[in-house]
Image (tube, rainbow, N blue to C red):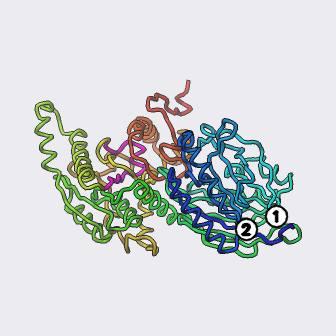
Amino acid sequence: MTQTTLKIASAQLNPCVGDLSGNMAKAREAFARAKAGGADILVLPEQFVIGYPAEDLVLKPAALEDCKREAEKFAYLTKDGPAVIYNLPWLQDGKIYNAALFMRGGKITDVRLKHHLPNYGVFDEARIFARGPLPEPIEFNGISIGIPICEDLWQPGVADHLAGLGAEILISPNGSPWRRTALVERSTTLGEKVFNEGLPLIYVNQIGGQDELVFDGSSFSMAADGTIVQSLKSFVEDFDIATWEKKDGIWVCMEAKREAHLSGLEADWRAMCLGLGDYVNKNGFKQVVLGLSGGVDSAAVAAIAADALGPERVWCVMMPSRYTAGESLGDAEDCAKRIGCRYDVIAIKPAFDAFTEMLAPMFEGTEFDTTEENMQSRSRALTLMAISNKFGPMVVTTGNKSEMAVGYATLYGDMCGGYNPVKDIYKTELFALCRWRNENTPADLLGGDYPIPDNIITKPPSAELRDDQKDSDSLPEYDVLDDILLGLIEQDLPLEVIIARGHDVATVKRIQHLLYIAEYKRRQAPPGVKIGSKNFGRDRRYPITNRYRDKLPSEEN
């Protein structure tokens, strides 16, 4: 008998890659909620059993076998309903596929293989998975259901193929990472596809941090005309059972929750909190430690860490040198007090003096330069790593994207650590984010009210590694620098277009040169949260040894 009412449970969950037992515990809890709520079908996110992206972990035969074993155990739960759409790496005919299983009546009844394998940006699925054939709909209680897996929705061929074979509704498990354009891309691209095919869509995305990627969830459903009829929360686990009814041959959503999807500065801030928090928690660290300099970068990272982990798990250390201003000492202490974290002061003068004395015979007759500046930064790194080794907290680094781009950072110094939540945030963006955080204290952010002193935001940035040093001594003002970098990195523009924005020719060429020669540093930097469209590492992969430089038309032969 054909159903005319369908209750679909969307389980927006946070997996940990490789934690099969932990992930399946979450899945069983979602199954129990779906069953209690009278759901007909439970939908889990893409690759949920092993976590996404598991990268080369899916090439391990033992991991594949364990995933299959978990699937068979989970299928047994469905003997009395609800049915489940369950995604995993699947070995079939000697090839590994990204597969969606349909489970009902206590067994796996259908297998659908991902057809389009993303191989761009942060994705390299074509390296580990085989491409499946165009999928056919499955039949469930007289209803024809299409199950496009993530990328199958974005590329041509799959949705219209399913529609042509009589699919009435699309249900899609996803592992779609956050970037600033994510919400717009999903609503416009997928909305157009839904509208063109005339098929409603249930889109279930995972949430959570996985190394450099953050998944925002923001799961949703669309009516057949492309309008949003269901929306789950952003950056937190969520669950909902939507009720659909068939009216005049079209499935219509009659009841579902509607949460506001987050964007803008709050989304960026929460992405950084989620990325850092999951990296710390999923890797088993109890606490983090960072150098709190009195500058905006470290203050922002301290606030992010406190928001994500709670202030009791954040340890800030001010490590002054002879060049540290009294103002910076006061600002750092003020910031730590506002956040409520542990705060210690450890002067690096004894270490710097020891290194200076040790190297004096070698350096005789030379002038103070970046060598001595970097010795200070590396003395701080040694201090933080000693604390980490002795007491166990993970060192968090604080370099923003502007600095990482041009190499304005010390290798084995301020770049030393396990994770960097602001790695993909330009300096000008960081100022805006700090102002937003001071003006907003959502209840689930744990760092308190107004965590960043105004003076930290308004004073001229300085590394304080020599007398009267300012960042602007070595770099253009950050609004200029960031606009040039945006053109070079995210937009990949020709030099003449960037110069036409009003920038000096020599400055643009110098920044381009610094960007290329700093690649070796970035390769050795810790991972950090991807926020924009082209982060260093997973998105932008340039060779370290590289003599290519963009030229102006007048310079070309």
Classify residue 483 as left or right of residue 319.
right
**Magenta stretch, residue numbers:** 393-410
Q: How many labels does the image show?
A: 2
Residue 373, by quadrant, is top left
| Label 1 CA crowd tier, 10 Å (few <14, some 14–19, many 20+) | few
At 60% from the left and 50% from the top, the residue drawn is: 69
Q: For residue 404: magenta? A: yes
Mark number, residue 428: none
Mark number, residue 141: 1
Classify residue 223 as left or right of residue 529.
right
- The residue lying toward the viewer, choosing from 461 and 189, is 189
Q: Look at the image and tell me in which quarter the C terminus lies.
A: top right
Residue 341, by quadrant, is bottom left
Q: How far apart are marks 2 and 1 (CA)?
A: 10 Å
- Whether pointer 2 and pointer 1 mark residues with C-beta atoms closer than 8 Å, the reply is yes
At 82% from the left and 62% from the top, the residue drawn is: 143
Q: Is residue 56 visible?
A: yes
Q: Look at the image and tell me in which quarter the N terminus lies.
A: bottom right
- Amino acid at the residue labelled 1: Asn
- Amino acid at the residue labelled 2: Asp
Looking at this rendering, what residue extends furthest in the top direction? 557
**x and y, in percent, of residue 461 in the image:** 32, 56
At 30% from the left and 70% from the top, the residue drawn is: 340
- The residue lying toward the viewer, choosing from 1 and 514, is 1
Classify residue 489 as left or right of residue 373.
right
Q: Can residue 502 be seen in this view?
A: no
Say what secondary structure mark 2 lies in: loop
Residue matched to label 2: 40
**x and y, in percent, of residue 473 in the image:** 31, 47
**x and y, in percent, of residue 515 in the image:** 43, 39
